Amino acid sequence: MEAEIDKSDLQNVLACPDCDLLLHQVGIARGQKAVCPRCGHMLYSSKKNSVDKTLALSLSGLILYLPANFMPLMTMDSLGFEKSASIYDGVVALYQHKYFFVAIMVALTSLIFPLIKLSLLFVVSLSLKLRFFPRGLAQCMRCYHHLDEWGMLEVYMVGILVTIVKMYHMAYIRYDAGFFCFLGLLWVALGSSVVLDEHLFWRLIEQKNS
């Protein structure tokens, strides 16, 4: 990569997110990485079959979404009294107890944003797979990028684990189908971020628009 930028070729210019150095985007072979020559930050890497893997994982996430969020996660049995709840039940309980802000934040980060992210990723990857480029595809990819930091399923998982640690000696805990679906959804969400080659996706979108 070179630091000298031709002003007439701004379409192929990339700014390093760490040091703001302007660089020319270059093609890289599969398995290689593009690194900023000033600060060493990894700019992008080439990933094998990124479109196919992203499509498969986003579709799997959409299939798992309903059971993961609306089926009971765990059943706790204490002194013969059983209590089970889903993520949706937790949001409703917070709202009913007038924790409105917390209920809204949990609903956004655990229910709404993950669904929007998976839907956007599915639409973009399916469009690229079928070589169908509807108007607004770039906006879908941009929205996914902005929402990527707001889908916090892993944070909710930490809360579940904390509850298990605190309650295991006080009650018998039975893991229901929703718990395993939620684990699958968490794995799919993290996996889709790993296999997504944003540089490739944007290059394919821009080639069609150019």
Image (cartoon, rainbow, N blue to C red):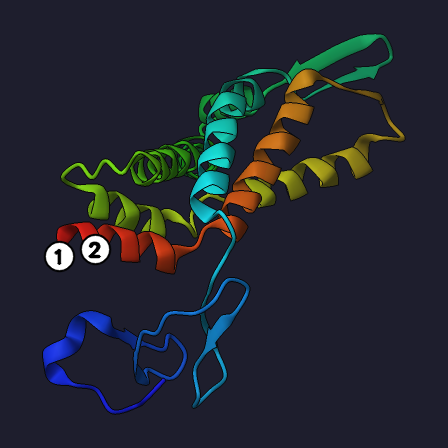
Query: Which residue is depicted at the point 46% across and 43% down?
Result: 151
Check the picture and name the quadrant holding the C terminus.
bottom left
Q: Which mark is residue 5?
A: none
Query: Which residue is depicted at the point 17% across and 36% down?
Result: 134
CA separation, marks 1 and 2?
5 Å
Query: Dividing the picture into quarters, in which one does residue 18 lie?
Result: bottom left
Residue sticking out furthest to the right: 169
Residue sticking out furthest to the front: 29
Between 132 and 65, which is closer to the camera in this rendering? Answer: 132
At label 1, which amino acid type do we have?
A: Ser
Query: Which residue is depicted at the point 24% across and 50% down?
Result: 205
Q: Which mark is residue 210?
A: 1
| Residue identifier under label 2 | 207
User: Residue 129 in the image: x percent, y percent?
Assistant: 35, 37
Q: For numbered disc 2, what is the local secondary structure? A: helix
Q: Is residue 57 shown left or right of residue 183?
A: left
One can see residue 143 in this view: yes
User: Residue 169 in the image: x percent, y percent?
Assistant: 90, 30
Query: Which residue is depicted at the point 71% across and 14% down?
Result: 83
Residue sticking out furthest to the left: 8
User: Residue 168 in the image: x percent, y percent?
Assistant: 85, 30
One can see residue 93 in this view: no
Figure label count: 2
Q: Given contact means CB atoms under 8 Å apart, are the residues at marks 1 and 2 in contact? A: yes
Does residue 4 lie above or below 183 as drawn? below
Q: Residues within 10 Å of mark 1 (few under 14, many from 20)?
A: few
Q: Is residue 174 shown left or right of residue 99?
A: right
Does residue 74 lie above or below 198 as drawn? above
Q: For numbered disc 1, what is the local secondary structure? A: loop
At label 2, which amino acid type do we have?
A: Gln
Between 32 and 183, which is closer to the camera in this rendering? Answer: 32
